[in-house]
């Protein structure tokens, strides 16, 4: 009798997904956006076992049906200290296209991924690497839309996370989308708040029951109730506890308060005793290696049967072996394997792996480190060397991780402390102030060396200040400055300078006397630039002449191309209203930062650049730079800049007439921030809201908000001793419109009494404008003339235009129209150039009332362009190619092309050869 012929077995169906309709609908929208419109980044979060990996697998299957090419990476706890390990896994299918990249981008990728013959330190530019990856992805997406899938992002190395965040922010015009999954409590800081999040929370009771019933042997009776209670809606727990019950095991023992993840790890380990010893050894090697490469296991244990050794684990459902990779059912499986092994077994596994990784010194150093429980100079030195290689590639986070472990293994306490400080420096450059604080907090217990302890306090103070803990930063830094004044004056001035930044941001004048006392004990010539900033930051108005003299001396002492000195002198120039010098110095600092990629500091410099651009009338550039500063600060954890950059953007929106968005953005910026401890942000917030209210025509609210930049004492004082004073003109104008000129006059008189004998031309003009608006008719003109006749005021065009407008209105109302028209016309030209629509309308109305012949309303040729579109159009008009523009603006060539495609119809042209004429001031067209 012939046996029946059975057809080949069908592939197993995808795992049943219940209770995740909302999540799958959101991911469908993401997939649609990959080759269309919509949000192109989604962060999927959830507790361990929530089914994130299952949803990522579902997205991969769904993408295949939509003809999307999928690139995947899964974070590995063992590789989290290896610079760009995750990026290599993600991009490996595309690396054959590296040779098609522009030369510098190609060199950066080849250097970063070890594709060249030797490491090229000059090519290891993080910005070029990021841009090269973006170009590589963009080129691939032109051939087939891409879906980037990132699973277990909490275990990716930080260099990869930096790269992914860079790409994620630039996908809007690409045929690509990114889905990133991470544990809810461990979402990487680069993705924790700046991208849409989708939480895969606990299943409701109905879907939890459905999932339980879908198991091969669903539990019944009391066991069913117990499992539902213990699983608490966690899908993996439901599955695993159901399997344990079917095998005759109960839920793992332990206190009821233990987190579910601990119970699950114990449950995973319970599967191991039934496996053969060789299988358990192989699984332990997989867990210890930190990678999924089967070859590592076979090389470390050559006596194992490479073909069959993991078969029992596969049959038990613990792992799956395919294409030379060992994929665990869930990362907690390998965690449980590792935890279940004895110390001797783990030690032997790490040594075996170290012995076969001789050609991979970074991984070998980490394996030796894991096998070392006592201080070991050789292993510590190997990790320090690994840190150096990571640092050379711009991998400061990986360097900090390696140096931290190297410090722990260093036998000499002073070397231990020194390596912790080196780790802190790398962590600062990587942009992790909380990490810096943790590292430096350990130094005091290791060494009595006063210099090392002082340096630790200096870095800790920096970290506190960056995270808005200004008072705490000052309390840490001032004792360092005082104790080091004699033995180490340069270190003392460094501490005083860092403290001065926090004192400025705090805005509390309480500290000024203490600063002056300590500064008097330090030899100022030891660090003239630190001394100049410390003095200017605390006395920008009251001792302006002295501060300016110190700035000039510091310029002569500045080292060539020193990042810290460029940034400090630029900030000093900015706070003293030497704006043109600030633009030059801070621009040089930004150029330096782009070359070296020190992400921990360029957010603050970028914000300072944005301030100078705003004040000098480069509003489109200021908007773009503020956006960059915000993103850099969000990645770096620099709260002072994330708030400040958003407030600057809110101010710009208000000035351009978008009062609703301005108000919403300002409120978003300060959400959860205690503004009482950061007066600089407080007054900028009030100013932004006050401008928005004024633009909306709500004069009473505008005055109330602007009035909050000064105290309500009998003798009103500036809430912030520097920033508040620049708002006097706006305060006076709002006071007149709201009928509260007397109160505004009291504020002005008190402010003038507190100023020094010599102030900057800018502040002098602001005060004179306010005095003119609040003076009687006989005195007003004298103040107006003092504000508009100083040629230096042309450096601050918007403020000059406001004064011209106010003066022109004053003249017209006194029937001196002929004198008013030139002032009003000059103001109108500035307002039109800046795009200050509310003031453009007001100046136009005044000109008509003054009898000026008004041409047909004209629009700037770039009025409809976004700030980024305007930048791209201007560069293209200079003859630059898309790739040249992309390299300069850190975009992909495809993104540049996408923007040009939108720019041409807005300008009424068809090709880039027409751009130069279209952007000419003579190309103004009637508004459409």
Image (cartoon, helix red, strand yellow):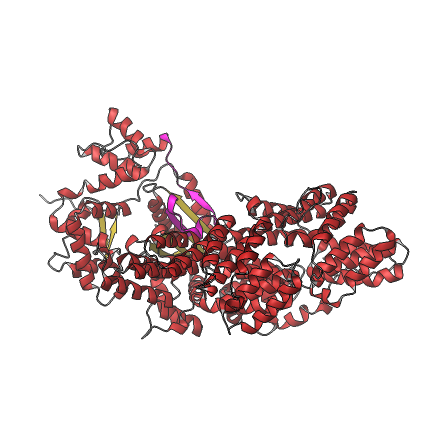
778 vs 771, left or right, is right
In front of the other: 840 or 476: 476
Q: Could you tell me which residue is drawn at 48 percent across and 61 percent down? A: 485
Q: Reply yes or no: does residue 809 show up in magenta.
A: no
- Residue 757 placement: quadrant: bottom right
Quadrant into which the C terminus falls: bottom right
Q: Is residue 835 left or right of residue 525?
A: right
**Which residues lie in the magenta part?**
179-205
Number of on-image labels: 0
Instruction: Name the image quarter holding residue 872.
Output: bottom right
Residue lying at the far left of the rendered structure:
1
Q: Residue furthest right?
A: 815
Please state which of residues 667 and 624 is positioned toward the viewer in this rendering: 667
From the top left corner, tell me how far across and down residue 300 is, in percent: 16, 60
Between 109 and 345, the one lying in front of the other is 345
**In percent of the image, x 24 and y 29: which residue is there?**
219
The answer to whether residue 915 is above or below residue 747 is below
- Asked if residue 40 shows in the view, the reply is yes
Q: Is residue 472 left or right of residue 159?
A: right
Residue located at (79% from left, 61% from top): 786
Closer to the camera in the image, 336 or 29:
336
| Quadrant position of the N terminus in the picture | top left
x and y percentages locating residue 648 in the rendered image: 60, 54
Is 180 within the magenta? yes
Q: Is residue 67 visible?
A: no
Instruction: State the image coordinates of residue 197 (x, y, percent, origin top left).
Output: 45, 45
Q: Residue furthest top?
A: 221
| Residue occupying the point 58% across, 53% down | 513
The reply, left or right, for residue 880 in relation to residue 274 is: right
């Amino acid at each position: 009798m012939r046996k029946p012929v059975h057809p080949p077995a069908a592939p197993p169906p995808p795992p049943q997904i219940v209770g995740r309709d909302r999540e799958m609908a959101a991911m469908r929208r993401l997939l649609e956006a990959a080759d269309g419109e919509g949000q192109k980044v989604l962060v999927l979060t959830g507790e361990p076992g929530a089914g994130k990996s299952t949803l990522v697998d579902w997205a991969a299957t769904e993408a295949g049906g939509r003809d999307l090419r999928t690139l995947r990476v899964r974070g590995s706890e063992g590789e989290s200290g290896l610079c760009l390990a995750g990026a290599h896994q993600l991009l490996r299918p595309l690396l054959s296209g590296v040779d098609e990249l522009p030369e510098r981008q190609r060199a950066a990728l080849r250097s970063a991924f070890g594709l060249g013959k030797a490491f090229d330190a000059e090519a290891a530019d993080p910005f070029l690497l990021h841009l090269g990856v973006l170009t590589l992805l963009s080129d691939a997406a032109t051939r087939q839309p891409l879906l980037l899938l990132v699973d277990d992002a909490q275990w990716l190395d930080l260099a990869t996370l930096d790269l992914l965040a860079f790409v994620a922010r630039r996908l809007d015009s690409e045929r690509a989308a990114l889905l990133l999954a991470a544990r809810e409590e461990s979402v990487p800081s680069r993705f924790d708040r700046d991208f849409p999040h989708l939480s895969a929370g606990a299943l409701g009771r109905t879907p939890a029951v459905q999932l339980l019933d879908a198991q091969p042997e669903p539990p019944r009776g009391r066991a069913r109730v117990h499992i539902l209670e213990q699983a608490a809606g966690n899908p993996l727990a439901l599955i695993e506890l159901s399997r344990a019950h079917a095998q005759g095991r109960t839920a793992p023992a332990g206190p009821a308060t233990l987190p579910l993840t601990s119970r699950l790890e114990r449950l995973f380990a319970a599967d191991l005793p039934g496996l053969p010893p060789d299988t358990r050894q192989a699984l332990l090697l997989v867990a210890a290696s930190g990678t999924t490469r089967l070859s590592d296991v076979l090389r470390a244990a050559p006596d194992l049967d490479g073909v069959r050794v993991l078969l029992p684990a596969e049959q038990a459902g613990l792992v799956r072996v395919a294409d030379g990779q060992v994929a665990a059912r869930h990362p907690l499986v390998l965690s449980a394997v590792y935890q279940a092994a004895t110390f001797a077994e783990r030690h032997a596994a790490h040594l075996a792996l170290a012995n076969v990784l001789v050609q991979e010194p970074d991984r070998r150093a980490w394996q030796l480190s894991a096998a070392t429980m006592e201080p070991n100079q050789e292993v510590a030195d190997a990790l320090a060397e690994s840190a150096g290689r990571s640092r050379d590639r711009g991998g400061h986070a990986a360097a900090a991780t390696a140096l931290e472990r190297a410090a722990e293994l260093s036998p000499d306490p002073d070397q231990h402390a020194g390596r912790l400080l080196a780790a802190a420096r790398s962590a600062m450059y990587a942009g992790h102030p909380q990490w810096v604080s943790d590292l430096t907090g350990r130094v005091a217990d290791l060494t009595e060396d006063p210099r090392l302890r002082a340096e630790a306090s200096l870095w800790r103070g920096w970290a506190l200040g960056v995270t808005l803990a200004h008072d705490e930063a000052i309390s840490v830094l001032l004792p360092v400055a005082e104790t080091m004044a004699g033995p180490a004056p340069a270190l003392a001035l460094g501490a005083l300078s860092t403290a001065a930044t926090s004192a400025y941001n705090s805005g509390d004048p309480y500290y000024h006397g203490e600063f002056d006392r300590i500064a008097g004990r330090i030899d100022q010539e030891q660090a003239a630039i630190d001394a100049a900033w410390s003095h200017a930051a605390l006395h920008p108005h009251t001792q302006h002449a002295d501060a300016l003299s110190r700035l000039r001396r510091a310029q002569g002492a500045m080292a060539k191309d020193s990042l810290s000195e460029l940034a400090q002198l630029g900030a000093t120039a900015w706070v003293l209203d030497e704006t043109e010098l600030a633009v030059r110095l801070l621009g040089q600092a930004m150029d330096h930062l782009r070359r070296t990629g020190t992400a921990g500091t360029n957010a603050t410099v970028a914000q300072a650049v944005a301030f100078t651009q705003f004040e000098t009338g480069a509003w489109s550039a200021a908007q773009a730079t503020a956006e960059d500063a915000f993103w850099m600060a969000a990645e770096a954890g620099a709260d002072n800049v994330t708030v400040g950059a958003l407030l600057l953007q809110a101010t710009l929106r208000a000035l351009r007439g978008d009062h609703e968005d301005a108000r919403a953005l300002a409120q978003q910026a300060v959400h959860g921030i205690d503004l009482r401890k950061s007066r600089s942000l407080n007054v900028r917030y009030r100013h932004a809201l006050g401008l928005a209210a004024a633009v909306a025509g709500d004069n009473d609210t505008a005055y109330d908000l602007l009035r909050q930049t000064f105290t309500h004492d009998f003798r009103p004082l500036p809430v912030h001793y520097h920033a508040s004073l620049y708002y006097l003109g706006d305060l006076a104008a709002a006071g007149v419109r709201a009928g509260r000129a007397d109160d505004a006059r009291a504020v002005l008189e008190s402010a003038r009494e507190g100023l020094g004998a010599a102030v900057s031309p800018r502040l002098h003009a602001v005060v004179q404008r306010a005095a003119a608006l609040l003076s009687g008719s006989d005195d007003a003109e004298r103040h107006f003339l003092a504000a508009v006749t100083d040629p230096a005021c042309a450096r601050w065009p918007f403020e000059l235009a406001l004064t011209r407008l106010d003066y022109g209105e004053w003249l017209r109302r006194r029937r001196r129209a002929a004198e008013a028209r030139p002032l009003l016309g000059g103001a109108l030209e500035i307002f039109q150039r800046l795009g200050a629509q509310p003031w453009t309308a007001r100046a136009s109305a005044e000109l008509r009332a003054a009898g000026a012949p008004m041409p047909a309303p004209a629009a700037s040729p770039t009025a409809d362009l976004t700030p980024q579109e305007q930048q791209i159009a201007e560069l293209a008009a200079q003859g630059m190619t898309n790739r040249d523009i992309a390299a300069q603006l850190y975009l992909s060539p495809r993104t540049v092309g996408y923007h040009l495609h939108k720019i041409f119809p807005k300008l009424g042209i068809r090709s880039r050869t027409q751009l130069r004429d279209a952007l000419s001031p003579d190309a103004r067209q009637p508004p459409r």
